[in-house]
Amino acid sequence: MDAIRRSLLGQMARLSAGAALIPFSSLAQAGINQQPARREGDPTKRYGMLVDLRQCIGCQACTVSCHIENAAPLGQFRTTVSQYEVQHQESGELATFMLPRLCNHCENPPCVPVCPVEATYQQQDGIVVVDSDRCVGCAYCVNACPYDARFINQRTQTADKCTFCAHRLEVGLLPACVESCVGGARVIGDMRDPQSQISRMIYEHRDALMVLQPEKHTLPQVFYLGMDERFTTRPTAEPVALEVLDPHGQEMGYEFHH
Amino acid sequence: MNSTIELLAPRYDIAWYPWAVQYFFMIAVSYASLWLAAPALVFGKKAWLPTARLALIACVSTTLVAPVALLADLHQPLRFWHFYAYANSHSWMSIGSVVLPLYLVSVLGLAWLAWRPALQAQRSAPGLSGMLATWLSLGSGITPRALVAVVGLAALGLSSGIMLYTGAELAIVKARPLWNTVWLPPMLATTGFIAASGLVLVLNRVSGLCSQTAIRQMLYVLLVTCALAGLVAISWFLDGVNAHVGSVAAALESVRHSDSWRNTALWGGITGLALFAAVLLLLTRPTLRQPGVRGAPTSSQPALFAWAWLLGLVAIHMGWMFRWVVLMDVQHVARNSAGFHHYGIPAGSSGILGIVGTFGLWLAAILLIELFIPWRQAQQGGLIATPTHATQDASSTHSLTAKKGASSHV
C-alpha cells in the first residue's frame, strides 16, 4: 500500500513539474519527425554490412579507396577507421583496437525526417542517399546524425555521405571499401536473401553482433563482430595532443595522448 | 582495459555557423518584443504604449534581419525556393519555412497599421520623409482599431509557431544530448524575453524617449523571465543529476570534465543571478520626488532608473551568449571521437563577418526606421495622430525629455 502511495505521489510530483511541457512534448512526438515513405531502389532487397573486427588490421585501405572512388575533398571522409591504443587492466599489456566507421544506413535514420526538402531519403533497399541537386546545404542532417557519418562537401556545398557505393552495387560491383579490404573484414549483401554471405554470418553470430549507439534507437544496419561493448558509445580519452596537417597547413585531424 | 588512446581522429567541422546564432537571437528578440508590444497595440492597454512603441521597432528591425541570417547559413542560399517546391511536412525546419514568411508579413502588417496614423500626419513634411509618408500611408482613411487587434492576434499566433518550431528543431536532435531535452525550448523562449526586454531598455535610452513607465514595465518582465529561466535551468540540471539514463544525464556526462564548459555554466549562472538581483534592487529603491515636467505638480523618478539601460545590455548579452553556447559550443562536443573539436572563429563569412554583418544590417534597419517612420507616435489604429495626441501620451506616462534623461546620470 505504502509503496503504491509513494509511487503515486512520485508520479504526481513529476506530472505537476512537467505539466506545462506535456502538450509540447506530445506534439513533438506526433507526426512531425516521423520517417517519410521510402522511394526508389529495389524493394526486394535490404542492404546491410557486417564488419568482422577480428579481420581488420587498420590499414586504412578502405578509407583511401573510398576517398578516390567517391572523390571526397581532402580531409573529408565517407568512411574511416578509428584506431585506439588500449591497455589491459591487470597485465598492462598494450593492444590496438580498430573500428571502421561509415554510415549505418539505419532502419530508423534520424537524418532523413529532418531534411526540409526531402533531398536525403532512404531507398527501398535501405540505402540512405542524398540528392545533391536538391540539397539546400542547411546541414540539419549533419547535426542529426549521431555517427558523424555526414559532412558538407566543401566542393559541392551539399550534404555528402556513404552510399554503400550504390552506383557500383547497381552494376554488380562491390563497394570500394569492401573491394579493397585486405582482410575481408567488410561483408556487404542483401539481408533479405537467406543464402547471402551476410545473412548466413548474421545468423551464425547473432548473439555476438553489436551496433553503434544502440540507445539512440536508430537501428543501425552495420553490424560489428568481435566488438568490445565499451566502444559502442563515445570512448573516454584524453584531450588533443598533436594536430595533423595537410600539405597546405590546414588541420585534418589530431592525435590524442595519455 | 584502463586507458584508451585514440590514435587518429578526423576533424569534424561544425555544420551550423555563427549565422545560426544570429538567426536564433534575432528571431527570439523579434517574437518576444512582439509580445511586449501586444498589451498596448493588441489589447488596448494605454499604460503600455511607450513600451509598445519601442518594442515595435525592436520587433520590426529584428524580423527583417533574421531571415537574412537564416538564408546566409545555408550552404546553397540560392536554392531557398526548394523549401517551397519540395516541402517536407515531417521536418520541423520545413514547417518553420512556412511559418516564418507568414510571421514576417503579419509583423510588417501590424507595424504598418500602428504607424499609419502618424504617417498620415507626416505627409505634409518637407523632403523625402513627407514623400515616403504619402506613399506608405496609402490614403487618408481611418485605421480601424479592430483591424490592428486582429492582425496583432494573428502575429501573436504565428509568433507562437516560431517559438515552437525554433525550439523543437533543436530539441528533437537525439544526436546531440545537450539539445535533446524538453527544457531547451522554454529556455530559448525565456532568454528571448530577457534579451527583448533588455533591447527595449537600451532603445528607450538611446532614442531619448526615456520613458519611466517603460523602464518599470521592462524591469518587471526581466524579473519574471529571469526567475523562469532560473527555474528551467535548475529543473534541467536536477533532471540530469537524478536520472542515470536519459539525454540530460548524457549531456552532463559529455561536458563534465571540461573546464571551459564549467566556466561557461558558472558565467551564465552568476550573470543571471546578478541580473535578477540588480533588477530587484532597482525596483525596490525608494522613489525620489522631483519638480514635475511642464508645471505638473511633481514627477516621481525612482532612483537608479537612469541606469536601467546598463541592465538592458547585460540582458542582451545573456540572450545572445545562451544561443552561442547552445548552437556553437555544443557542436564542439565530439560525438564519436574523444575530447572536443576545436573551432577558431574564422574572419570570413562563416565567422566574424557573419556576426558583425548581421548586427550592421540590424543597425541599418533601425536607423532607416528612425529616419523615415514616426515610430514615436505609434498607436492602436484610430484617427490621424496630431501633435496634441503625442503630448498627451508623453505627459501621461511621465516621460522625461531626452536632455533630462541624459543629464540624470552624467
Image (cartoon, rainbow, N blue to C red):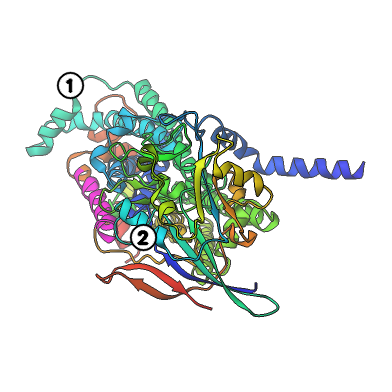
Residue of label 1: B139
Please name the predominant secondary structure of the magenta segment in the image.
helix
Residue under the image location 40 percent in, 44 percent down = A163
Chain of the residue under the numbered disc 2 shown in the image: A
The quarter of the image holding the C terminus of chain A is bottom right
Residue of label 2: A64
Which sits in the foreground, B29 or A32? A32
Q: Which region shows up in magenta?
A: B349-368
Tell me where residue B40 appears, x and y as whole percent: 40, 34
Tell me where residue B223 appears, x and y as whole percent: 52, 52
Query: Image check: B67 left or right of B298?
Result: left
Q: Is residue B306 magenta?
A: no
Residue under the image location 58 percent in, 74 percent down = A95
Query: Image check: B174 left or right of B156?
Result: right
Query: Image check: B277 left or right of A177?
Result: right
Report the amino acid beneath label 2.
Val
- Examine the rendered structure and indicate whether residue A84 appears above or below residue A122: below
- Examine the rendered structure and indicate whether residue A194 appears above or below residue B269: above
Which sits in the foreground, A115 or B271? A115
Q: Nearer the viewer, mark 2 or mark 1?
A: 2
Q: Quadrant of residue B120?
A: top left
- Examine the rendered structure and indicate whether residue A11 appears above or below residue B98: below
SS class, disc 2: helix
